[in-house]
Amino acid sequence: MSAVTNVAVVGAGVTGLAAAIGLAQSGVSVDVYEAASEMSTRGSGITLQGNALRALRALGLWDQVRQSGYPFEGLKLRAPGPAADIIADLPDVKTGGQDLPAAMGMPRADLARIMHRGAIDAGARVHLDAQVTRLEESGTEVRLSVNGEDRGGYDLVIGADGLNSTVRRELGITEKPEPTGMGIWRTFVSRPAEVTETQLYYGGPVYIAGYTPTGEDSMYAFLVEKAQDRTNVDDAEAIRIMEELSSGYGGPWEHIRTDLRQGAKVNYTWFTSHIVEAPWNRGRVVILGDAAHSCPPTIAQGAAQGLEDATVLTELLTGAEKLDDTLWDAFHDRRTSRAAAVVEASVQLGRWQLESDREADAPGLIVATAKKMAVPA
């Protein structure tokens, strides 16, 4: 029993591939259309909270993810300055259940590879260099054009094509990501033995400094500053800036600066946020993940929320006989307020830093949000 028999997924990121895997495993015919000419290997690392791991396990990917990543428990807050004193050791909130780690760090490229392979193994067809150029719903199907050519009709089109979603624009939805006022430097470096969980430093030369282990020999480190135009900064200058901004932090930052001087890769992006109010669908077209909601990575729930979108929708689609308002109401009841809570908490943590609010209870908000996420979507 399924409400759909053939589905087009636009976007081959975490959310889109999760939807493709879940639907294909249930016998649905799935085409994935990705505008890029190859699967992305860019980026540094990603933090997957327990509820993200729960979704990946449901897709049958947990063993591969566990082998590629670095599981850990807890979160430490450290003071800026040479001593880097530990000022808080936050309790574990195992958002995926007691039988999964509280969190896991892993290289983004490894997660992309595992999910791409998982989609193909499940029977989904993944088309690269495939830009969706038109959507047209007739009532019983959605006709899709890719690179200007008609690809036929689908029972459902899932727009999981990220922050600058083509599908969102085609649907006439005007909400879109807006800058929050912060920018982030990221680098991928070797892991010193003392780094066994995410550690954050609030205050000092930048708003937030931190790092997360991603493997036995790797971790990613980041510095969050006031958003600036860094478009003309070359690689050498990016390394110099990150080394300089991190100079006010001790502890493992000494190790990170050594790797920076040896040529570690650095990238820079702005934080953005948005939330599309329900409904996320227009007839037989729906947006998920970053197309529907985005937030700064201040509580590392972005990937988890996209995975939850995909797994909840898959559960509903494969458990119903038709695609109707009852199904969409159930989907929105389970997803929109939960995603909004994550966006609001993530933005609030950044706003407190921008406003230099010394009375803000960042640890309390982080733990409270995690407890919400521990209740399955």
Image (cartoon, rainbow, N blue to C red):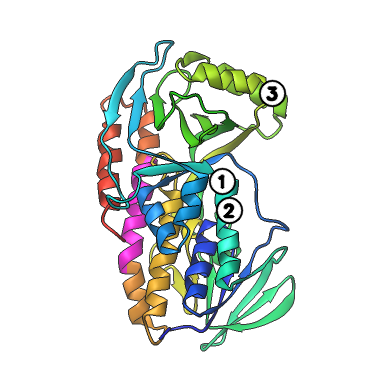
> Taking the image as drawn, is residue 48 in sight?
yes
Residue nearest the observer in this picture, 62 or 116: 62
Circle 2 sits in a helix, a strand or a loop, which is it? Answer: helix
What residue is shown at x 50% (from left), y 60% (from top)?
A: 15
* Residue type for callout 2: Ala
Which one is in front in this view, the residue at disc 2 or the one at disc 3? 2
Percent across and percent down for residue 216 are: 51, 34
Which residue was labeled with disc 1?
A: 108
* Residue type for callout 3: Glu
Q: Earlier in the sequence, mark 3 or mark 1?
A: 1
**Image check: 137 left or right of 204?**
right
**Can you say which quadrant of the picture contains the C terminus?**
bottom left
Residue 344 lies within the magenta run: yes
Q: Are marks 2 and 1 in contact (CB under 8 Å)?
A: yes
Residue 353 lies within the magenta run: no
* Gap between marks 2 and 3 measured at Cα: 29 Å
Which residue was labeled with disc 3?
A: 237
Circle 3 sits in a helix, a strand or a loop, which is it? Answer: helix
Which residue was labeled with disc 2?
A: 112
Give the magenta part as a residue range.
333-347
